[in-house]
Amino acid sequence: MACYVTIILSIVLYLVLNLVEGAPEVPCYFIFGDSLLDNGNNNDLDTAARANYPPYGVDFPDGPTGRFTNGRNIADFLAEHLDFDHYIPSFASATGDEILEGVNYASGSAGIRNDTGSHLGYRIYLGKQLENHKVTISRIADLLGNTTLAKNHLNKCLFIVGIGSNDYINNFLMPDVYQSSHLYSPTQYATLLIQQYSQQLKELYSDGARKIALFGLPQIGCIPDQLNQHSTFFCVDSTNKAVQLFNKNLKALVDDLNTNFSDAKFIYINMYSISSAIAITLLNNPCCQISKTMPEGQCNPGKSPCLIRATHFFYDNFHPTEIGNNIATSRAYRAILPSDSYPMDIRHLVRANNLYYDDQ
């Protein structure tokens, strides 16, 4: 009952906040990650990991845009919470001075590791996303006058990074395709991922990021794909334990980064506990008809989804519905429970002062 009440409060809070209009809380907002945040970067890639066809986007004003859900994703809802009057454009489509307000680099099937998701085709892994960000910085420098002014501008932006799920779903948990589970134990693999992730985040910092929200991994052991693979109605404990190893290390990394970079603030969003709370109140079976061919687990092209999508947590075998994204983002932005974020939520992060220096 308590969890149900928190979900209702979260929805009410979201509606109240969006009645208040004003200037964005940050001048710019940049997004890195995977299909949970992708808004079209994969559309023209040679990959099976695409969502630019119906029934994806059935509830989005522009229809299928490459978002892996029926409507808005986490990146979109967060833009609304931040009072942007538009959604942040994908790197593939961003042009002109709109990049001053942010760019979305996220790519379906992408991971921390370069090889993650390679069996699906081309994907923009995190290292490549960081390369794309350098292209954006160069363009911003041209618009503002020089690189120093560009980085001063970036100092004031919000950066979110949500990645790592595919390093399990489309790597470690596929022993017939990838060698990672043969080479490493779950503990070793989580350590390896965090070591690489740490270097990537330090690169992001060196490129001017000062307010960075890191999204932890959800309960991957509870997604329909895992339940199907293990022929069970219950969450796969071994998968969730592996994910928790990563999340524990990620939270510790936030402490390390905040200690080493005192002019920046990194925060951890606990998607594991947030997704657990949402799943209690919503149906766990996917809303759309699932394809039996590549990409297996995604929506069958052209087939109608379930009618009452607000009752489902998952749209396909991997991705949340719009309602799931809505609730998760609301709690990431404004924590309901102390466990939702660490050491603060996104609302406090964007309002934190003195995290950047204009003379850098």
Image: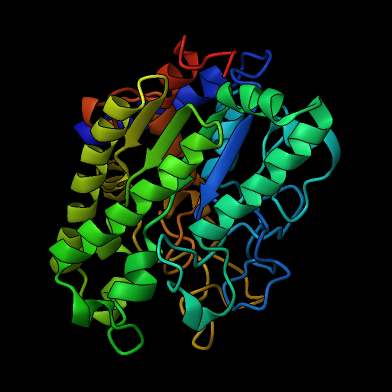
Quadrant that contains the C terminus: top right
Quick one: which residue is furthest to the right in this view?
96
Asked whether 258 or 146 is in front, the reply is 146
> Is 53 on the left or on the right of 272, as rendered?
right
Quadrant that contains the N terminus: top left
Figure label count: 0
Res 189 → quadrant: bottom left
* Residue for point 25% across, 34% down: 256
Color theme of the render: rainbow
> Is 315 on the left or on the right of 243, as rendered?
right
Asked whether 58 or 264 is in front, the reply is 264
Residue 104 seen anywhere in this rendered image of the structure:
no
- Residue 186, given in percent of the width and then of the height, sits at 16, 67
> Is 83 on the left or on the right of 288, as rendered?
right
Quick one: which residue is furthest to the top in this view?
353
Asked whether 331 or 101 is in front, the reply is 101
Res 190 → quadrant: bottom left
Q: Is residue 269 above or below residue 351?
A: below
Residue 288 seen anywhere in this rendered image of the structure:
yes
Q: Is residue 261 above or below residue 214?
A: above
- Residue 203, given in percent of the width and then of the height, sits at 47, 43
* Residue for point 20% across, 82% down: 182
- Residue 14, given in percent of the width and then of the height, sits at 49, 26
